Amino acid sequence: MHALRSLRVLLRLRGFRSLLAVRLLSQAADGAFQVALATYVVFSPEKQTSPAAIASAMAVLLLPYSLLGPFTGVLLDRWRRRQVLLYGNLLRTLLAMATAALIVAKVPDWLFYASALSVTAVNRFVLAGLSAALPRVVDGEEKLVMANSLAPTAGTLAATAGGALAFAVRLAGSTVDAFVVLLAAALYFCAALTALRMAPQLLGPDPTMLQTDLREALLSTARGLVDGLRHLAERRTAARALAAMTLVRFCYGALTVMVLMLSRYSWSSTEPEGLALLGVTVGVSGAGFFMAAVITPWAVARLSPFGWIACCAALGAVLVPSLGLFFLPGPMLAAAFVLGLSTQGTKISTDTIVQSSVDDAFRGRVFALYDVLFNVAFVGAAAAAALMLPPDGRSSTLILVVTVLYAIVATAMVRFRRS
């Protein structure tokens, strides 16, 4: 009820309504494009999917966020943010249409990945622009706190809805993957049109506050990241939490690749059946993420953040082998829920530890490094899984490696909490 009241207050602000509409359409398009990429790589009848292909797709989806993220702010503070939202979404529309054309033309995989990579690279600018523009359309600190809480959550729900719509289009009998990519392109175009509802100067930045030398701005950003890394090395509490989160994220990424291969080759005899099973698994894991948001504050208050991370890792160490070694859909669905809960519970606890143990002057730079670790761990996990997984996705070795990593995290967090 409180969230609904807060949303009603914010929706009275015209600028916020327009910015939120751009966010919802843009992130719905992101969700649809990501599902389109996954279904093309994993479930296209003409393709023999391999773990290496899945690893490549994950690199396309995640590496731009990691490598470009720290530097996007430099450019966003030099361009009008409304124009970034307008032209960024128009550019993604064209690039997504080009990607659809490449799918129809059955070009070599490297060319398809290059096109898809260009779409996801632009995403980083649009998402950062949405966040940077928020204070320009919301007045007052209390409203800004509400907006920072509600807008990203609404965007995540929109991305989920866009992915679900793409799944529905695929399951409805669309055998051409390009149709799903064109759905994403249409949503990107709608987001660009919605950005026109705002005046070009509404979202800033103030031209008088710019750093005039672009080269110096980029160099200062790089130096800032190095300073953030040095500061993190001096804060063992935050460093250990980030190390634990990186390992847990690695485990989750490796198991995600395994589930993709099982859905494609072991759990189904037809493409729609495998796609439906994958959709259910993703939904169950998402329910685990939601449950983590509900119970983590209670658990952290009783166990401390490190104690809760230890419990989350212990859950993985116990349940991954006991449920995963069957390689059956039912036990894997239970494992997906628990791992969604434990992964998100670990992330929320890590956020809390970093926020409370890092000096405010370095917090932004440390979180930029955090973002890089978070995404690179997932891509690295996909690459490692590609080396261990057979074509049908059944790998006891992968299950045991993940179990050992979870056990290491749990043991280390218990020892650090006691010390």
Image: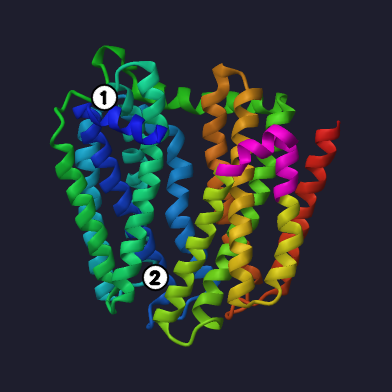
User: How many circles with numbers are drawn on the protein?
Assistant: 2
> What segment is highlighted magenta in the picture?
294-312
> Farthest bottom residue?
269
Q: Quadrant of residue 206?
A: top left
Element class at badge 2? helix
> Farthest top residue?
208
Dividing the image into 4 quarters, which one contains the N terminus? Answer: top left
Element class at badge 1? loop
- Residue displayed at 65% across by 44% down: 245
Q: Which residue is mark 2?
A: 39
Dividing the image into 4 quarters, which one contains the C terminus? Answer: top right
Residue 346, compared with residue 221, is above or below; it is below
Q: Is residue 305 magenta?
A: yes
In the rendered view, does 19 fall on the left or right side of 372?
left
In the rendered view, does 59 fall on the left or right side of 412?
left
Q: How many C-alpha atoms fall within 10 Å of the one at disc 1: few (<14), some, or many (≥20)?
A: some
Relative depth, front residue between 367 and 415: 415
Provide residue 147's location: percent of width, then percent of height.
Answer: 36, 29
For marks 2 and 1, give the CA distance: 37 Å
Provide residue 417's location: percent of width, then percent of height.
Answer: 81, 34
Q: Which residue is mark 1?
A: 137
- Residue displayed at 71% across by 25% down: 235
